[in-house]
Amino acid sequence: MTGAASPHSLRSTLRSLRPAAFGADPAGERMERIRRSPNFADGVFRNPVGARTRPSGSTLEFAKIYFQKEARRLRTPEAPVPLHTTTLSDLAEPPVSGLRLTWMGHSSVLAEIDGRRVLFDPVWGSRCSPFAFAGPKRLHPVPAPLASLGPVDVVVISHDHYDHLDLSTIRALAATDTLFVVPLGVGAHLERWGVSEGRLRELDWTESTEVAGLRLTATPARHFCGRGLRNQQHTLWASWVVEGPSGHRVYHSGDTGYFPGFKEIGAEHGPFDATMIQIGAYSEYWPDIHMTPAEGMRAHLDLQGSEPAGVMLPIHWATFNLAFHPWAEPGEGTLTAAADAGARVALPLPGEPFEPTSDDIPAAPWWRAVAPAPAAAPTSAAVRPDAAGAAPGARAASDAGAIADAAVRGTSPGSGAGAPETAPTA
C-alpha cells in the first residue's frame, strides 16, 4: 500500500507540470540573495514609492469598456502598420556618431554604442502570452528577423512580464554567445530556458556590471512582476542606464509609473544622449505603474536635469493592444507633450535606425496614415489628468483590455497584485 505523497514530492511534481513559459521561481542562493536585498521586505520586492499594483475597476466594469464597439475599433490600426523596409542594410553601416537606436516595436530597442550592441527587452514572439492561442497578438510584424541582426554583445531585460520577456526569443538568443543582464531573480527564468549561469548577470537597483566596455546599471522603476498563476513578487523590475567607453549614455525605462526617482537617476547618471521612455498602455485604473505621454515627458526632463536635452524615444506602444486607450493616442500625446516642453522626440517607424546626436531625427507622425478616425468626438474611458496636470490619455490592461490580459497572466482583472499585466502587464 502506497503512503500519501510528501509535500516536497508534491511540489516537485507540480513544478514539473508547470508550463515552460511560466519560467521558474528563484530558489537556493538566488533566493537568499533576494532576501538580502534592501529592496525586499516582508517577503516581496517593494517599489521606491508606494504603488497600487492591482487595478481599481471591477471585471464587469472592464468588460463594459472592452466590448464597447467604438472603443474596440479605435484600439486597432485600420490598415497595416508601416514598417521601415531597409533595416538590415541600414544596420550594416556603422553609425557615424557612434550611437544609434533602432526601435523594433513595443519596448524592444537595439542600441549600438561605441561599436557594441545592446538589445533591450527583445520580444519577437507573435503573442505576449504563455499560450500560443490566447493573449495580446502583434499588430505589426517584427521589422527584421532576430537571426539576421547579427551578433549582440548583451541582452538587457527590464522585468519578467510577457511583453518584455519572451520565451521563444530568449531560447533563440540562448543559442548565441550573448550575455544577459537582468534584474535580481529574473535569471531563474532564463536558466530554465537554456541560458547558462555563466552568461547571466543579475543586478539589484544601483548595482553595475561591465560588458564589452559598456557599463550597465540597474536603476529603480515603479512597477511589479510575475508570470505564473501566483505572483510572489520575487523577481525585481528595473530601468537601465548604459554608458559606452566614449561617454555616450542612454536610458531605458522598462515599465514604470512616474515617481521622483527620475531626478535622482538623472543627477547620478545623466544627462543622456537618448532616453527610451514608456508612454503607452496606461489607464486611470492602474495610475501608479504606467505613465501617460505627459508623465513620460516629465520623466525625460527629470532625467535630463529639467532641461529639454537629448532625444526622447517613446516606447511601449503601437505593437500590442494592452490598454483601453485608442491605438494612436500615445503617439499624439507624445507630440503634444514634446511641443509643450520644447523637447526633441524621435518618432521612427518600427525598424527605422536613427542617431540621437545627429540633426536628422525622424519626426513625422507616421501612425496617422493607419489610425482609425473616431466616429465622433473621441472619448477614452481611461482618460485622467496626469501628475503634471495634462490629460493625454489613460493606462494599461491586455489583448485589448484587462479581459484579454487576464489570459496573459493567468489571472483576472482585480484579482490581486498580478492583475495589472492583465490589467497592466504591459
Image: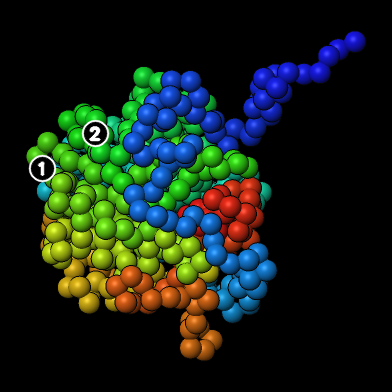
Q: Nearer the viewer, mark 2 or mark 1?
A: 2
* Mark toward the start of the polypeptide (2 vs 1): 2
Report the coloring of the rendering: rainbow
Q: How many badges with numbers are in the image?
A: 2
Q: Residue at x 63, y 47 (%)?
A: 410
Q: Residue furthest front?
A: 42
Q: Residue at x 41, y 45 (%)?
A: 46
Q: Amino acid at mark 2?
A: Ser
Disc 1 secondary structure class: loop
Q: Residue at x 43, y 24 (%)?
A: 32
The residue closer to the viewer here, 374 or 349, is 374
The residues bearing labels 2 and 1 have C-alpha atoms spaced at a distance of: 16 Å
Q: Residue at x 47, y 67 (%)?
A: 283
| Residue 27, image x, y percentages | 50, 24
* Disc 1 target residue: 247
| Residue 344, image x, y percentages | 19, 66
Against 174, residue 239 (above or below) is below
Query: Which quadrant is home to the N terminus?
Result: top right
Q: Are marks 2 and 1 in contact (CB under 8 Å)?
A: no
The residue closer to the viewer here, 95 or 294, is 294
Near mark 1 (Cα within 10 A), the count class, few <14, some 14-19 or many ≥20, is: few
Q: Residue furthest bottom?
A: 376
Q: Is residue 25 left or right of residue 151?
A: right
Q: Quadrant of residue 363?
A: bottom left
| Residue 122, image x, y percentages | 41, 43
| Residue 102, image x, y percentages | 30, 51
* Disc 2 target residue: 208
Which label was assigned to residue 330? none
Q: Is residue 193 visible?
A: no
Q: Is residue 101 left or right of residue 21?
A: left
